[in-house]
Amino acid sequence: MAPASSQGLEILILGGGIAGLTTALALTKFAPKDQIPRIRIFEVRPVPATIGGAVNLTPNALRLLDHLGALPIIRERDYGHTIDFLEVFDIYSTRLATSDFSGPEGKGVGNPPYKALRITRGDALKGVLSTLEQHENITLTCGKKTIDIKETADKVTLTFEDGETVSGDLLMGCDGIHSVTRNKHVEPERKETYSGVANAFGFAPIEKDFAVHFDCTAINFARRGMLLTSYHNSAKDSVYIGAVMQVPDIGSRDGWKAKGAEAEKTRAEILSRFGDSNIPCIVPLIKKAEDFFLWPIFTLSKHGKWATDRVMLLGDAAHAMPPQGESTGIVFEDTVLFSRCLTRWIEKGKPGNNMKEAFDAYEKLRRGRIEAAFEESKDVVRTVSDAGWLGHKIKTYVIPWFLWFTSGTRQKHFIEDVTTVDIGY
């Protein structure tokens, strides 16, 4: 267990999702042993949100979860399904390409090697929450709605709807695309915008003899969207189905919530887009799914303000973008790299008590990677948007070439260990 040190920083975190929890673990993991921070996490929901779709944790993401102590718990509880490779299909014809995670010896990539893991967001969060409970310096309080953020030269103060106030040396905004930290304090004018595509997902229970067309996980391209089909547990008795497709803007969060609750209309929409598939299992899987949820994908502008003097945004709060295959791993890298920059500032004796020095070092280290990922995400939106017969045909020729051309960059990301990379500070 990591008790708080009387010499450590008082850190506040808004957001009790994966970003906020892993940030707390990283700030604890990399802090000087005699200056363990006291970290208080505040989540607006009454309980941590353990519902959601399934994400693919790439090797670099698993490497960081291992460093933070969460991967052993996830492995012990048998959460998720190991992914050796991802397959890409055209639903009207054949397999187009694969993306490999198994490495040259079949054990994974990097040293030590890691493959990928398809896991529900709920199981990933439960594994991280269990890790959090091992640290006395970290507390999580749910049901706290922030209504005001005040920053002075030496502290940050949060005011909650119930009238309580708390203060700390540092505030981490890990509260997602609709970030209160960004909208109320860091950059109120930088608003989230709808990307034009939404993700509809559900889980289809299957029998042991149910035949699927993929080994572990598959992306299936159609003329009107992309359908992800994947195992997400070791029993292989359920298939995660996620349809990313072009959907008109509803115009309000309440409107999206109402549309998202119409599961059968969402199922009908997915069948209208992928029901003409020549892959035999696609339609039965869509019909077997017990429920469907529809989530609009919002994004932020490419450039934006990430920090003030004592407040830093991480994850979607800083740089939300459409999913591009490594989104969760990018969040984990954010948390670790920022924690290392802050720790270096502490080790240097907190020069001038100017925390912004650590913030600037982090941004210099991180901006390039985020901006490159942002450009990749724009390709995803174009690829899943509605296309005619010719447009789809061109897409099926381009995708294999694109995967081959970018494979070196992906492999470089997969083997990178940001716990040891030179932070230049």
Image (spheres, rainbow, N blue to C red):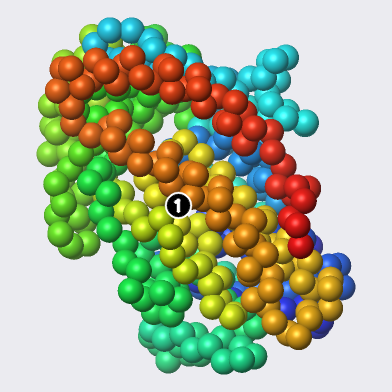
Quarter holding the N terminus? bottom right
| Horizontal side of residue 9 vs 149, given as left or right | right
| Residue type for callout 1 | Thr
Per the image, label 1 sits on a secondary structure element best described as loop
Which one is in front, 376 or 83? 376
Residue at coordinates 25% horizontally, 54% vertically from top-left? 194
Few, some or many C-alpha atoms within 10 Å of disc 1 (few <14, some 14-19, many ≥20)?
A: some
Residue 295 percent coordinates (x, y): 28, 48
In this rendered view, identify the residue nearer to me: 117 or 76: 117
Whether 173 is drawn above or below 270: the answer is below
Expressed as whole percent of the image width and height from the top left, the position of residue 94 reads 33, 7
Residue at point 59%, 80% (across, down): 310
Q: Position of residue 324 (x, y in %)?
A: 43, 38
Q: Is residue 364 above or below residue 404?
A: below
Quadrant in the rendering for residue 245: top left
The answer to whether 75 appears left or right of 400 in the picture is right
Viewer-side residue, 355 vs 2: 355
Give above or below for 223 relative to 213: below
Residue that badge 1 annotates: 50
| Quarter of the rendering containing residue 345 | bottom right
Task: Determine the residue positioned at 73% across, 74% down.
Answer: 37
Give the residue displayed 42% in from the left and 91% down from the top. Answer: 163
